[in-house]
């Protein structure tokens, strides 16, 4: 047999391809004649180091440049072949994973499977393509640097993580993007892009056995990596006092960002932190909106509870109105955090936050692409079963949980504060 069935859970079946340990998830859904296929690699900027930061993202670009089968010279370049079938396709890179995906008519499932199996090990990664794509990535990097909130967020992460690779932005540092040798990218590709470091996910209108046969046909000939996938073993030490900095750059508006260290995505406190995030900043009745935007101190106020493979951050970002002082906005934002520690939120606030999260999750699961995307994200950061279990975990969050996580994680010694100050 090609596959070993590992488990079945809520309509999702997990298999292991015996020849090379490729993890496979299949989710038949017959609602429409479309199918989504994704390969998630357990590699991201978390696996990079100084000198080759941004390698995963640059490879994301290069893996669209061709293989001996799919290439521009013979008129079968990847984008052209997929566009001919009306496919929606792309790839994305994050701290902990990289995802390549297609959504296309269900009778074209084999094309998506063959394409992903082919570029897993047969991508060209030529020096000519690296140089042309480097300029594309550099332009992307420069656009990010022109976004005050974006560049401030990059610097907050860099200040909050001194040793762990979350210190590096996913897009990489400019000098590494410009200077990384092609051979270094090939080495990175040859270390991480193997079936035993990947999960293949198929969602949509297909017969399960047919899909498995196609996955076996195209992925079974690929050998597992010749060496164990290198573990990322760096652990960020406990923070021992507040980090604080000022970033002065050209811009129009001031920004304040505050980040607190929080646990990894598998931790049982993540659902409560997610609900707390929505209490703070989801909608016009949220606490930060009422305290800062409604009072004409800020143009916008957001927060985000990150769920990552390793401990991450909870961030709070405020864009100031002209003439408003950073210190005033920071003080008011921190006062809202302190209220969460001392007083229970209301039942109405808790219910609203839960409803927003649960509604969003329902929308995510409304199409094959939504399901494959959510499964891929869960697989990259925690485990695919979290896709199924997270709504119930959110529903179980209590008023006391919100107060407890606020008291536990929003402390001065684990805080990083950054100011973006516009420079004329």
Image (cartoon, rainbow, N blue to C red):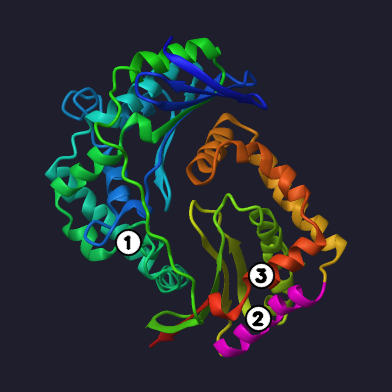
Q: Secondary structure at mark 2?
A: helix
Left or right: where 98 falls relative to 119: right
Residue at position x 24%, y 26% from top?
70
Quickly name the residue at label 3: 408
Dominant SS in magenta: helix
Q: Earlier in the sequence, mark 3 or mark 2?
A: 2
Q: Earlier in the sequence, mark 3 or mark 1?
A: 1
Image quadrant occupied by the N terminus: top left
Figure quadrant of residue 306 = bottom right
For marks 2 and 1, give the one nearer the viewer.
Answer: 2
Left or right: where 353 falls relative to 114: right
The picture places residue 10, in percent across and down from the top left corner, at: 67, 27
Q: Is residue 107 visible?
A: no
Left or right: where 5 falls relative to 289: left
Label at residue 141 = 1
Q: Nearer the viewer, residue 110 or 297?
A: 110
Q: Which span is picked out in magenta? A: 326-343
Image quadrant occupied by the C terminus: bottom left
Residue at position x 61%, y 31% from top?
367
Figure quadrant of residue 301 = bottom right
Residue at position x 64%, y 86% from top?
331
**Within 10 Å of the Cα at label 1, are there few (<14), some (14-19), or many (20+) other Cα atoms?**
some
Quickly name the residue at label 2: 334
Q: Nearer the viewer, residue 113 or 238?
A: 238
Q: Secondary structure at mark 3?
A: helix
Q: Are marks 2 and 1 in contact (CB under 8 Å)?
A: no
Whether the magenta-drawn stretch holds residue 179 is answered as: no
Q: CA distance from mark 2 to mark 1?
A: 31 Å
């Amino acid at each position: 047999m090609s596959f070993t069935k590992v488990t079945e859970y809520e309509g999702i079946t997990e298999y292991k391809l015996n020849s090379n340990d490729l993890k496979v998830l299949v989710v038949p859904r017959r609602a429409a004649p479309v199918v989504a296929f994704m390969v998630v690699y357990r590699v991201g900027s978390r696996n990079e180091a100084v000198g080759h930061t941004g390698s995963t993202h640059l490879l994301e670009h290069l893996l669209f440049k061709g293989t001996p089968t799919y290439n521009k010279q013979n008129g079968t370049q990847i984008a052209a072949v997929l566009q001919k079938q009306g496919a929606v396709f792309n790839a994305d890179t994050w701290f902990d994973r990289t995802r390549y995906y297609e959504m296309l008519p269900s009778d074209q499932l084999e094309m998506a499977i063959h394409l992903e199996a082919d570029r897993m090990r047969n991508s060209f990664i030529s020096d000519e393509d690296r140089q042309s794509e480097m300029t594309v990535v550099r332009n992307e990097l420069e656009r990010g640097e022109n976004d005050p909130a974006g560049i401030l967020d990059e610097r907050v992460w860099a200040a909050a993580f001194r040793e762990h690779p979350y210190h590096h932005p996913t897009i990489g540092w400019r000098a590494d993007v410009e200077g990384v040798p092609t051979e270094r990218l090939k080495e990175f590709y040859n270390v991480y892009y193997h079936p035993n470091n990947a999960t293949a996910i198929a969602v949509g209108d297909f017969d399960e056995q047919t899909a498995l046969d196609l996955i076996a046909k195209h992925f079974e000939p690929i050998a597992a990596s010749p060496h164990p996938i290198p573990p990322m073993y760096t652990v960020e030490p406990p923070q021992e006092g507040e980090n604080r900095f000022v970033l002065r750059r050209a811009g129009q508006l001031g920004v304040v960002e505050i980040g607190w260290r929080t646990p990894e995505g598998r931790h049982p406190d993540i659902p409560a932190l997610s609900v707390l995030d929505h209490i703070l900043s989801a909608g016009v009745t949220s606490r930060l909106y009422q305290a800062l935007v409604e009072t004409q101190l800020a143009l916008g106020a957001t927060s985000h509870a990150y769920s990552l493979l390793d401990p991450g951050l909870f961030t709070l970002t405020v864009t100031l109105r002209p003439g408003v002082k950073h210190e005033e906005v920071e003080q008011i934002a921190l006062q809202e955090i302190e209220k969460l520690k001392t007083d229970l939120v209301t039942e109405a606030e808790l219910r609203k936050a839960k409803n927003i999260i649960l509604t969003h999750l329902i929308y995510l699961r409304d199409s094959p692409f939504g399901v494959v995307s959510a499964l891929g994200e869960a697989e990259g950061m925690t485990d695919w079963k979290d896709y199924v279990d997270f709504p119930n975990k959110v529903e179980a969050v209590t008023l006391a949980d919100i107060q407890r996580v606020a008291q536990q994680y929003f402390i001065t010694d684990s805080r990083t504060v950054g100011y973006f100050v516009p420079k004329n």
